[in-house]
Image (cartoon, rainbow, N blue to C red):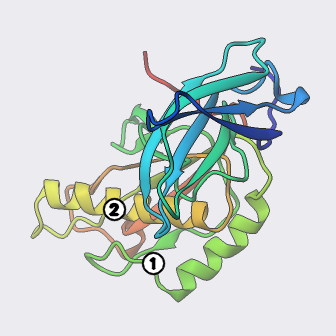
């Protein structure tokens, strides 16, 4: 897919009972004309009144298809069907927050100094620096990410979030690795919650030095690729 645009929501959703008393319905999503041949998947989600998800059906869209149907349980009181569209560059507006966030490789190999070789182009934002042994975002971090989210809303592509930890010669490598992953995950989830609809991939690298590091090592780096989620997939 060469068109780097975010997908649009479906044109309409039809719901048809299968057989009377069977307890099942057919939900049919009709794509907008300009999404035919561009959408990769349609996702049907049965959402409960409390916001939880009862069932998810994700279906690949054939290249020439204008509509797609899924068999779903008849809705209980308070339930509704949420339908959204995926393509290589992101999700349509009706997708729930964080649905575009996935864990995966954000770099390949290391350089001679042991630093990960990260994918994508560096965005002109300050690094997010965390408190010691903490994966939590503070008010300054959120304000900085709010500014970035405003710039990225409506942009189609792949956001790459890489987390790191400071070597302190006390905590083990597994702890520091998991800490760096949680830092990256929290940044990714926050950007998604602020309206970024492009795909967001995150990973953590732990401590990359063998000697005690500095506060700058407690960071998350944010990079961008306009190539979409299929870029940098290691075969």
Q: Which part of the image, by quadrant, shows the C terminus?
A: top left
From the viewer's perspective, is 58 left or right of 172? right
Residue for badge 2: 182
From the viewer's perspective, is 150 left or right of 204? right
Residue 231 shows up from this direction: no
Name the residue: 78% across, 11% down: 64
Q: Nearer the viewer, residue 80 or 39?
A: 80
Residue 166 at x, y percent in the picture: 29, 67
Instruction: Identify the image quadrant of residue 213.
Output: bottom left
From the viewer's perspective, is 124 left or right of 25? right
Q: Nearer the viewer, residue 71 or 116?
A: 71
Name the residue: 28% across, 55% down: 206
Residue for badge 1: 137
SS for callout 2: helix
Q: Nearer the viewer, residue 80 or 11?
A: 80
Q: Nearer the viewer, residue 31 or 76?
A: 76
Residue 59 shows up from this direction: yes
């Amino acid at each position: 897919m060469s068109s780097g645009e975010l997908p649009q929501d479906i044109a309409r959703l039809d719901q048809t009972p299968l057989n009377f008393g069977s307890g099942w319905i057919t939900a049919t999503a009709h794509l907008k004309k300009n999404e035919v041949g561009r959408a990769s998947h349609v996702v049907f989600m049965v959402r409960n009144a409390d916001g939880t998800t009862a069932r998810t059906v994700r279906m690949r869209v054939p290249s020439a298809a204008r509509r797609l149907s899924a068999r779903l349980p008849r809705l209980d009181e308070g339930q509704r069907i949420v339908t959204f569209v995926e393509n290589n560059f992101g999700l349509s507006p009706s997708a729930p927050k964080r649905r575009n966030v996935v864990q995966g490789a954000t770099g390949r190999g290391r350089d001679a100094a042991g630093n990960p070789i990260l994918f994508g182009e560096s965005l002109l934002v300050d690094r997010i620096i965390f408190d010691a042994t903490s994966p939590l975002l503070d008010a300054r971090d959120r304000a900085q990410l709010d500014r970035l989210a405003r710039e990225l809303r409506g942009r189609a592509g792949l956001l790459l979030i890489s987390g790191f930890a400071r070597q302190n010669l006390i905590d083990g490598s597994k702890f520091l690795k998991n800490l760096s992953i949680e830092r990256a995950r929290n940044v990714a989830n926050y950007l998604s919650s602020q309206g970024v609809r492009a795909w967001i991939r995150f990973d953590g690298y732990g401590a990359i030095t063998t000697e005690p590091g500095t506060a700058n090592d407690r960071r998350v780096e944010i990079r961008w690729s306009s190539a979409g989620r299929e870029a940098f997939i290691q075969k």
